[in-house]
Amino acid sequence: MSTLTNQQSSNSSKIRKLVGRLRSASNSTRTTPDASTDSSPAASRPPSLKLRTPRDSPPPTSFSSCRRRKASSSSSHDAAVAAASLGLWNAAYDALRDNPGCVGLVVAYETIISQELPDSLKLGGANSSFRGKTPEQRRELLSAIAAAGLRKRRGSKASLADDASRRVLDAAKEAVEGLWPAYPAAAVAWAGFCTLTPVRCSSVYPVSRHAADEKRLKLLLDAIMQRDDIRAGLVHVVGRIPWYMHLAQLPSSEPQQRETLVRLYRWVLEFEMNCVCATASAWNAAAKNVVGWAGLCKLTQTIREADDKVAAIVRRQGAVDMGNWLQLNADLDLSSPSLANKDDEQLRPPDEGRQDAQVAT
């Protein structure tokens, strides 16, 4: 028993260190957009709200103890909101996993995204799903998967359809990166979207040491973006990632209100898992068989109705800061310019540039 406990502790430590390294690498490779242009996918959406803190600032003459008390209160509030968010998403994940009609979907989803784990953390075989893991162990695995997905910056020469896929994934990953520090639950909620890539591209410089496996297992969003039901669902869900995360700030003392949020999150997770399994269906027969192809349009409509219901709750609260959240309850704008060309340059192998120069001469 002592050996097993030490092994679990060691694995958890490895995961935390890995996530830290991957997220640090992701942040170091991000570029700052030109301030003179407004080409970011996030620019078409209202900015994410910061965690709510007490509004009244102490006057300059206030005692330092007042400032310390306020900082402590703000920190406690932030921690409470983060914990509430994680509790809601864990409850939604468990509800989906424990639904007899969704067991196959969840197992296939977890097996597919586990390909992003390093060899030292891969589950393998019959244990590829997270069944039997505690919520904290599951969060750590999903954090490692999300961090690995965010670290990758794949590019290509895109068609118009490909460009839409790129904008969807750019928006999703930018939102997750921005929200993750305040909401650790972002990994539980959005790890699946973080593993997706827009299009197949043979000329992209490999960013993984498992290049052969990566080429075979790429989760190509463009292939399913051709379907109107999936495209509409992605525009709705991805555009609302900040909205879903900030909803944890709503008072959840009422059991009915909490259950409303859990149901909404459960449907969002179900849609995300369907998207991931649909992208893998080209090379994974099991994934193809668990996708609810015929019910995706209805699922998206269910999410829309649930969002309307939650928006009504926000309005009912009557607080000014909560009312501002309604700006985040909006579809993703696919008409904004893409960052595809910029990503292409970032991913271009160093030798390729020199080869082009030689050809030109």
Image (spheres, rainbow, N blue to C red):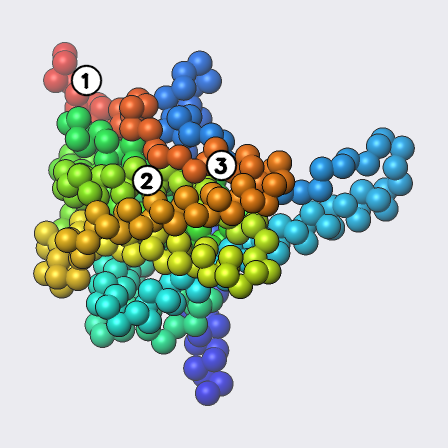
Question: Around disc 3, counting alpha carbons within 10 Å, would you say few (fewer than 14), some (14 to 19), or many (20 or more)?
Answer: some
Image mark for residue 236: 2
SS state under label 3: helix
In the picture, the disc for residue 326 is: 3
Rendered position, 214 above or below 56: below
Callout 2: SS:
helix
Q: Which amino acid does label 3 sit on?
A: Leu
Q: Which residue lies furthest to the bottom in this view?
A: 1
Relative height, residue 288 to residue 127 (above, below):
above
How crowded pointer 2 is (Cα within 10 Å; few <14, some 14-19, many 20+) is rated as many
Q: Distance between the residues labelled 1 and 3?
A: 51 Å
Could you say where residue 236 lies in the image, as x and y percent from the top left? Answer: 32, 40
| Front-most of residues 156 and 58 | 58
Total count of labels = 3
Q: Disc 3, disc 2: CB below 8 Å?
A: no
For marks 1 and 3, the one nearer the N-term is: 3
- At horizontal 15% and vertical 27% (from top left) the residue drawn is 159
Does any portion of residue 90 appear in the rendered image? no
Relative to 98, 358 lies left or right = left
Could you tell me how far apart the alpha carbons at marks 3 and 2 are, in whole angstroms?
Answer: 14 Å
